[in-house]
Image (spheres, rainbow, N blue to C red):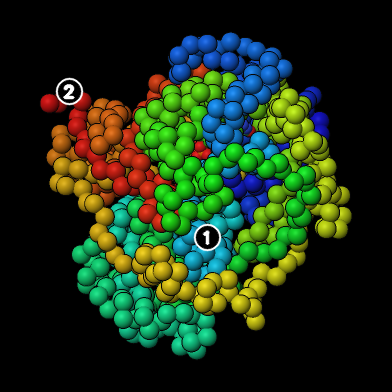
Amino acid sequence: MHYAYSVCDMCMNKCGLIARVEDGIVKKLDPNPKFLKSRGMLCARGNAGIDRLYDPDRLKHPLLRVGERGEGKWKQISWDEAYTLMAEKFDEIAKKYTRCGMLFTPGSDMQSTFVHRFAEVYGSYNVTTHESNCLISRNRAFLDTYGEVPFADLLNTNYVLMSGSNRFEALVTPDSTDLMTAKKRGCKIVVLDPRYTKTAALADEWFPIRPGTDMAFFLAVTNVIINEKLFDADYANNKLFGLEELRIHVQQYTPEWAEKECDIPAKDIIRIAREMTAAAPEAIVYPGRRSSDYIQSTQIRRSMAIVNALLGNWDRPGGLTATRQVGLSAPELEEPPFYEDNPDDRVDVDRAPLMFEEEGSFKHIRDAVLEEKPYPVKGWFIYKFNPMQSGANRQKTIKMMEQMDFIVNVDITMSDTALYSDLVLPSSSYLERTDPASGLQGSSACACVVTRDPVVKPLYESKPVFEILKSLSVKMDLGEYFDFTVEEYRKQQLRKLPNAEEILKKDGVYYNQSKLYGIYEGKIYKTKSKKIELMNTRYEEMGADPMPVYKRPKMPKSNEFRVVVGRNAYFTHGSTSNYKHLNELMPENMLWMHPKAAAKLGIKEGDLVAVKSAVSEVELKATFKFGVREDTVYMESGFGILSKDLRTVHGKGACLVELLEDQSDALTGNMAMHETLVTVQRKGVL
Ligand SMILES: Nc1nc2c(c(=O)[nH]1)N[C@H]1C(S)=C(S)[C@@H](COP(=O)(O)OP(=O)(O)OC[C@H]3O[C@@H](n4cnc5c(=O)[nH]c(N)nc54)[C@H](O)[C@@H]3O)O[C@H]1N2
Ligand SMILES: Nc1nc2c(c(=O)[nH]1)N[C@H]1C(S)=C(S)[C@@H](COP(=O)(O)OP(=O)(O)OC[C@H]3O[C@@H](n4cnc5c(=O)[nH]c(N)nc54)[C@H](O)[C@@H]3O)O[C@H]1N2
Ligand code: SF4
Ligand SMILES: [Mo]
C-alpha cells in the first residue's frame, strides 16, 4: 500500500487530495490537509473520483464511427490508424477551407494548454472554451469596473449579499467552506434566489427575487447608498470615477420602483443598503461565478460591482481581493508557423462587441458554423467539452455537428457529444497522467501551485491529450513544435520558484507567501480612468450604456414559467450523473414547481409533464418537494442523455439544454440560459 498526492478533477476547483493505492488499485481518495484552498475538504464528487477511473462505461479504445451520426455504431481502430486518419483529415480541411476551417474546443483542464498550443501550431485561431457558457459576462463586468476580476474574501467578511449564486451547493473552494466559517463567526448572509437553495436555507434572510430583475435591486441599493450618503466620501473622491454621473443616473431607480420590478419590499432594500454600508468595508456583494443567464448579464453584474465599489471593499480584508502573484513562468516554446492564406479574423468576429478574443463565444461560433459565415468551418477537435449537455439549444448543436466534415473527440466516456463525433479517443483520467503545473491565485487561502503525477498507470488504451497531440504533430510534420515532454514543460514553468519540485513532491502543493491585501496601494488601477469605474466611458464610445440601465426582461405570461439553471452539491454539469456513487443520490431529474402553480394545471407530485419552449419539448416528472417561485421552474442538468453507453443514467429524466433557447449576453456573447419561457402540461391532458 502507498499514498500519492494529486489534485481532484471532478470539477474545476482542483482540491488537493491523497490517494490510497493498494496492489495498483486506488482504494480511497482523501483530502490533502496541507492544501489550504479547499480547507482540508474533498466533497461528495471528489470522494467519488474513483468512479471516473473505474467507471465500467469508460472509453477503452479509439473508436471510428461506422453508422450514421448519433447512431452509436463504432469500429475499434488502433492508435496509429487514428493518428493517420486525423492527419489526413486535418490536412484536407486546411486545403479545402484554410486552417481556420478547424475549430478547437479545449475544456476546463490542466492539459488544455496543449490543445491551445496545437491549434496555434496547426494554424487555426478558432478556439473556444467552456467559459463562454459559464462566466465571461461576470469577468467582463468586474474587469471593466476594477481592471481585474476579483476574489471574495469571505473568510474575513461580516456581511454577504449573494445573488445569482449558490455557494453551499455550487461548490467553489475556498468560498463555500469560508462562507460557512464566516457564518459561524456571525457574518450575516442574505440570499436572492428564485429557488430555495441550500444556501438560502442556511442564510439569515432569503428573498425569492423575480428572476431577471437583479439589476433593479442593485440600482435601488445604489440609490439609497448615494442619496443617504452612506459611502466614505474621501475614499470615493480618491478611488471612484463617475460618482456624480451615477448619482444623477440612479435617481430614477427608487426602492419603491424596484419593489415592483424585483418583488423585494422597498423597506428591505433600504434596510439592506444601510446594513451593508454599516458593515463596510467588511461587506461584499458576492460577484458570483456562472453568469450565463441573461441578455443583460454584463450590465447586471456591473450593477453588483458598482455596489461593491461604494462599499469601498476593494483590495481590503473582508472585501474583494486582487489576483495574487504565484510566480509560474511561461515555458519558452518554438514560435508557431504563420499561414498566409488564413482569413483575417476568428469566425465569430463582430458578433459581440466585448467578446474575449482568446475565448470567443460558443453560441456565436455555432451560429457562424451553421451559417457558414464569414467562412466555412468543417472540422472540430473537442477535448473534455460536452456542449450536447452544456450548450443551450441541443438541436442546434446536433445540426452543427451534422454539418461538419470531421469531428475528433477526446473524452473519457461516450458523452452525447462524443456520440455525434467521427473519431472518439479514450482519455486518461486525472489519476493516471502527468500534468503541467497550475497556479491558484485567489483568496486568503492560496497563492499556490499544484500539479499531477500518475497515481496509477493508464487503464486500457487511454492516453493523455498531450500524448495524442504530440503523436499527431509528428504525423503532420509539425513535430518540432511539440518537441518536449510534460515534465520538461513543467520544469520550465517552475524555474523561478525555489525548490518547487521538491516541495510539490513532499507536500502536494507549493505556496508563494505573496501579498494578499493592499496590492493596489500606491498603484494605478488598470482601467481607462485609472480609478474604479462607476461610469465606463469606453462602453459609451462603443454605444453601450456607460452605467447599467434597467431593461425589463421578457416576462412569463400567466400560463408560462421561466426555467432557470443551477446545481446540487453532488453532480458536476452533465459529466457525473452516470457514476454509480453519485447517481444513487439522484437517479433522475424532476421539474421543480410551486405547488400552487401545479395545482392550477392539475399536476400532482410525481406526474409526468410535458415542458415546452420555443425550441423544443421534453418530458419528465414534476415535484413540489423543493422551494421555487410560482412563476419559475427548475430542473437539474445531466439527464435526458442520448448515449446508450452511459448505462446508469441513459433513459432517465430530461435534458435541460434541449429546452433552452440559445440567447446570449449582448456585450460578451456569453450564453444566456435563463431567457427561456416554457409552458407545462400534465401528460395525457389535452
Ligand atoms: N445544462 C447546463 N448547461 C450548462 C451548465 C449547467 O449547469 N447546466 N453550466 C454551464 C457552466 S457554468 C459550465 S462551466 C459549462 C461546463 O460544460 P462542459 O465544459 O461541457 O463540462 P462538463 O459537462 O463537465 O463536460 C466535460 C466533458 O469532459 C469529459 N471528461 C471528464 N473527465 C475527463 C478527462 O479526464 N479527459 C477528457 N478528455 N474528458 C473528460 C466528460 O465526460 C464530459 O463529456 O456548462 C455550462 N452549461
Ligand atoms: N456541485 C457543483 N459545484 C460546482 C459545479 C457543479 O457543476 N456542481 N460547477 C462549478 C462551476 S463550473 C461554476 S461556474 C460554479 C457556478 O456556481 P454559481 O455561480 O453559484 O451558479 P449556479 O449554481 O448556477 O447558481 C445560480 C443560482 O442563481 C439562481 N438564479 C436563477 N435566476 C436568477 C436570477 O435572475 N436572480 C438571482 N438572484 N438568482 C437567480 C439559480 O436558482 C441558482 O441557484 O459552480 C462550480 N461548482
Ligand atoms: S469541489 Fe469537490 S469535485 Fe470540485 S475539485 Fe473540490 S473535491 Fe473535487
Ligand atoms: Mo462554470
Residue 260, image x, y percentages: 20, 64
The quadrant holding residue 663 is: top left
Q: Which mark is residue 684?
A: 2
Question: Decide: marks 2, 1 in contact (CB < 8 A)?
Answer: no
Which quarter is ligand 3 in?
A: top right
- Depth check: give the residue in front, 461 or 206: 461
- Depth check: give the residue in front, 375 or 638: 375
Question: How busy is the neighbourhood of tag 2: few (under 14 within 10 Å), some, or many (20 plus)?
Answer: few
**Marks 2 and 1, Cα distance to the nearest angstrom?**
46 Å
Residue 217, image x, y percentages: 31, 66
Q: Which mark is residue 179?
A: 1
What's the residue at 54%, 20% (across, down)? 422
- Depth check: give the residue in front, 669 or 598: 669
The kind of secondary structure element at disc 2 is loop
Residue 501, image x, y percentages: 84, 49
What's the residue at 46%, 44% (across, down)? 348
Q: Which mark is residue 469?
A: none
| 35 versus 400 height, above or below | below
What's the residue at 34%, 73% (across, down)? 221
| Res 230 seen here | yes
In the displayed structure, does residue 254 sit left or right of residue 638? left
Residue 551, image x, y percentages: 27, 61
The quadrant holding residue 301 is: bottom left
In the displayed structure, does residue 575 sit left or right of residue 639? right
In the displayed structure, does residue 131 sit left or right of residue 19? left
| 637 versus 64 height, above or below | below
